[in-house]
Image (cartoon, rainbow, N blue to C red):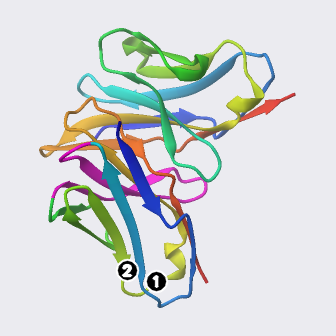
């Protein structure tokens, strides 16, 4: 069966520090990968998605970047965190095909102080 | 772009009462619709999905949803609420945009179950 791992679960970082969140998927090949951010009362905002190694699409301009160095690895990064980067970050994968559902990791709660 | 609207950011029901969470979609083509549930500090879990095979879709934990094209709705229901149903629920639509598969979520409805 397929599983998705996301870490760390919680993170407290000072403003201006770098960020690296990692997500890996097991049990499937060539998945579509996604990073979402969830802010209170605002639902889920799609940040990045990837359809293959090295292929990253950004949905909104921001202080963050994403990379996919391996087929089942997706990394969210920042060189300098802002207070507004605080939130709940969710990684997700889905198999190819329009009707396939997203499968989410357990999320990372990021607090920028 | 396709979108979904969830009416009511908070819904409260008594234990044992009917649960009804509303979702309306906006789509120019037949949509693929999903309902997800999120418990505190966890990721989202798929409850059910509509892919045009049947208008009444049954999901996990006793939930079901009915696709009504005439009303552009995909409301989530459960006949009898349990305390364990207290969570946030998200409606979502999947569509193809520029050759990429995208998913747009509603803003969520928090369900409170009162004992």
Which quadrant of the rendered structure holds the N terminus of chain B? top left
- Vertical placement of residue A70 versus A27, above or below: below
Residue B76 % position (x, y): 55, 22
B25 or B50, nearer to the observer? B50
- Vertical placement of residue B60 versus A25, above or below: above
Q: Residue at x 55, y 59 (%)?
A: A39
Q: Residue at x 63, y 16 (%)?
A: B78
Chain identifier of the residue bearing label 2 in the image: A
Q: Horizontally, is A109 left or right of A62 in the view?
A: right
Chain identifier of the residue bearing label 1 in the image: A
B4 or A66, nearer to the observer? A66
- SS category of the residue bearing label 2: strand
- SS category of the residue bearing label 1: loop
Residue A14 % position (x, y): 56, 87
Residue A65 % position (x, y): 30, 73
Q: Which residues are magenta?
A: A28-52
Residue A40, can we see it? yes
User: Is the same chain shared between marks 2 and 1?
Assistant: yes
Dominant SS type (magenta): strand
Find out whether residue A51 is within the magenta segment: yes
Q: CA distance from mark 2 to mark 1?
A: 6 Å
Q: Horizontally, is A90 left or right of B103 in the view?
A: right
Query: Can you identify the residue that label 2 sits on?
Result: A78
Q: Residue furthest right?
A: B115
Q: Residue furthest bottom?
A: A16
Q: Horizontally, is A88 left or right of B115 in the view?
A: left
Mark drawn on residue A81: 1
Which corner quadrant of the image does residue A6 belong to? Answer: bottom left
Mark drawn on residue B38: none
Cβ atoms at labels 2 and 1 below 8 Å apart? yes
- Vertical placement of residue A57 versus B109, above or below: below
Q: Residue at x 20, y 33 (%)?
A: A97
């Amino acid at each position: 069966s397929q599983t998705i791992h996301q870490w760390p679960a919680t993170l407290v970082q000072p403003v201006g520090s770098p960020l690296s969140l990692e997500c890996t998927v097991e049990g499937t090949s060539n998945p579509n990968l996604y990073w979402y951010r969830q802010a209170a009362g605002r639902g889920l905002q799609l940040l990045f998605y990837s359809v293959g190694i090295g292929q990253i699409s950004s949905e909104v301009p921001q202080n963050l970047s994403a990379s996919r160095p391996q087929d089942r690895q997706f990394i969210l990064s920042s060189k300098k965190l802002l207070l507004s980067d605080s939130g709940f970050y969710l990684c997700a994968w889905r198999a190819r095909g329009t009707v396939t559902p997203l499968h989410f990791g357990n999320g990372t709660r990021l607090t920028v102080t | 772009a396709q979108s979904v609207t969830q009416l009511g950011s908070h819904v409260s029901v008594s234990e044992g009462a009917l649960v009804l969470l509303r979702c309306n979609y906006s789509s120019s083509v037949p949509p693929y619709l999903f309902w997800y549930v999120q418990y505190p500090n966890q990721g989202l879990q798929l409850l059910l999905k509509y892919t045009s095979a049947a208008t009444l879709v049954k999901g996990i934990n006793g939930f079901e949803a009915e696709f009504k094209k005439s009303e552009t709705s995909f409301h989530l229901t459960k006949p009898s609420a349990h305390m364990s149903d207290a969570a946030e629920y998200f409606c979502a639509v999947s569509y193809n945009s520029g050759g990429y598969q995208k998913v747009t979520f509603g803003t969520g409805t928090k369900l409170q179950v009162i004992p």
